[in-house]
Image (cartoon, rainbow, N blue to C red):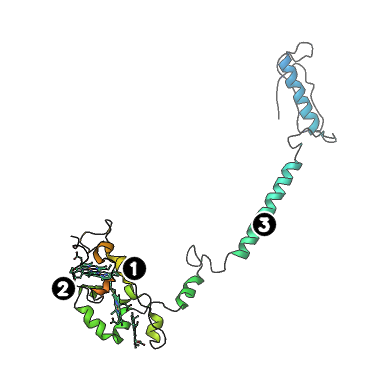
Amino acid sequence: MLRLTCTTTRIVHPGSLCRVTSITGPCDPNHRSPTESQLFKSIAQFCAQLAPGVRRRKTSLFKDIEHLVRLAVVMAIALVAFVGLRALVVPHSFGQYGHYRGAAIAEIAARPAAFAGHDVCEACHTDVVDQKKLGKHVVVPCEACHGAQAKHADDPASVKPSKLDTAVTCARCHEANSAKPKAFLQVVTADHSGGLACDTCHQPHRPRIEEASQTTPATERKK
Ligand code: HEC
Ligand code: HEC
Ligand code: HEC
Ligand code: HEC
């Protein structure tokens, strides 16, 4: 293993894996330099430990291994607990299609629809449709203003849509806001309506006021 040439060949442990057969230089105890002597001592100690039948003192690399063992045990328990808990807590269908619960798709699809769609409304409320066709609100679907009305559409006799507050409904789209496209008609509702409900002057389904002279806004219309 370790081969040094030396005048004296002192460290030979019979049966040991380590065998220092020779050391270079003047390694006679009387002529050794301090460093050489230290090296010599260390090698001798190491060889002595490896020799069979030698009761090793606990001066090895793993002298205080107990604390490492404890740490390893704690980490192993934590890993097992994590894997176990994860298996318990994570739903079965998780990851079926992607990073979400696969079963959620069927669950959501099974929920009753909240919106009926404007075609359904129009089948019954033909008068409103006729009005709406004449104005620019033709592009606005019923439920954009009246809210989700699938329940009413299913059973109009017992479920009635609640009355709308135009100050909220109309302002949601038409309240002046510099973030909106300039081309979209906007008013500062407080100034424009003077506190009146929008449908005092505007027919909600056909909002253009044909004879503007008859109903003037509280303030001049904003350009
Ligand atoms: C099956 C026919 C039918 C369908 C579909 C229907 N409605 Fe109606 N709706 C009615 C009837 C009938 C009334 C009148 C109820 C009453 O006055 O008792 C009514 C009343 C209303 C009212 C007025 C409630 C009030 O205050 O008097 C609104 C608003 C309304 N429907 C909106 C809608 C919208 C929006 C839809 C589409 C999601 C819709 N309706 C679909 C039959 C229908
Ligand atoms: C721009 C918003 C808006 C849209 C779009 C809209 N409505 Fe209305 N609707 C109103 C407002 C506001 C009222 C008056 C307040 C109320 O009744 O809640 C009203 C009233 C009604 C009424 C009560 C009676 C009447 O004719 O005034 C019915 C019925 C109605 N809407 C049905 C519909 C249907 C059906 C559609 C789609 C074809 C529709 N609305 C689209 C805003 C709207
Ligand atoms: C969901 C959004 C939305 C709501 C809510 C809404 N509007 Fe509109 N409104 C529009 C759109 C879109 C237009 C058409 C804009 C265009 O074509 O330039 C419009 C146009 C108008 C116009 C101009 C009509 C014309 O012929 O020049 C008036 C007035 C108006 N709305 C009033 C109202 C009133 C009053 C309410 C409340 C009852 C209301 N709007 C609710 C979207 C909305
Ligand atoms: C006192 C009557 C009156 C009331 C109340 C009123 N308006 Fe008007 N509004 C008018 C008149 C008149 C015009 C100009 C004629 C037109 O464009 O239809 C107008 C125009 C508009 C326009 C078009 C603006 C443009 O630049 O062409 C919008 C949008 C509008 N109003 C929304 C509303 C909203 C939203 C409310 C409720 C907060 C409301 N109005 C309340 C009378 C009124």
Secondary structure at numbered mark 2: loop
Circle nearer the N terminus (3, 2)? 3
Residues at marks 3 and 2, CA–CA distance in whole angstroms:
80 Å
Seen at 75% across and 24% down, the residue is 42
Query: From the viewer's perspective, is 109 left or right of 67?
Result: left
Secondary structure at numbered mark 3: helix
Query: From the viewer's perspective, is 61 left or right of 145?
Result: right
Query: From the viewer's perspective, is 144 left or right of 214?
Result: right
Give percent across and percent down for residue 23. Answer: 73, 20
Circle nearer the N terminus (1, 3)? 3
Circle nearer the N terminus (1, 2)? 1
Q: Residue beneath label 3, please?
A: 80
Q: Nearer the viewer, mark 3 or mark 2?
A: 2
Q: Residue beneath label 2, please?
A: 214
Q: Which labelled disc corresponds to residue 37?
A: none
Seen at 73% across and 35% down, the residue is 61
Q: Residues within 10 Å of mark 2 (few under 14, many from 20)?
A: few
Q: Nearer the viewer, mark 1 or mark 2?
A: 2
Q: Residue beneath label 1, please?
A: 168
Instruction: Check disc 2 and give the amino acid type.
Output: Gln
Q: Which quadrant, please, contains the C terminus?
A: bottom left
Nearer to me, 152 or 39: 152
The residue most toward the top is: 31
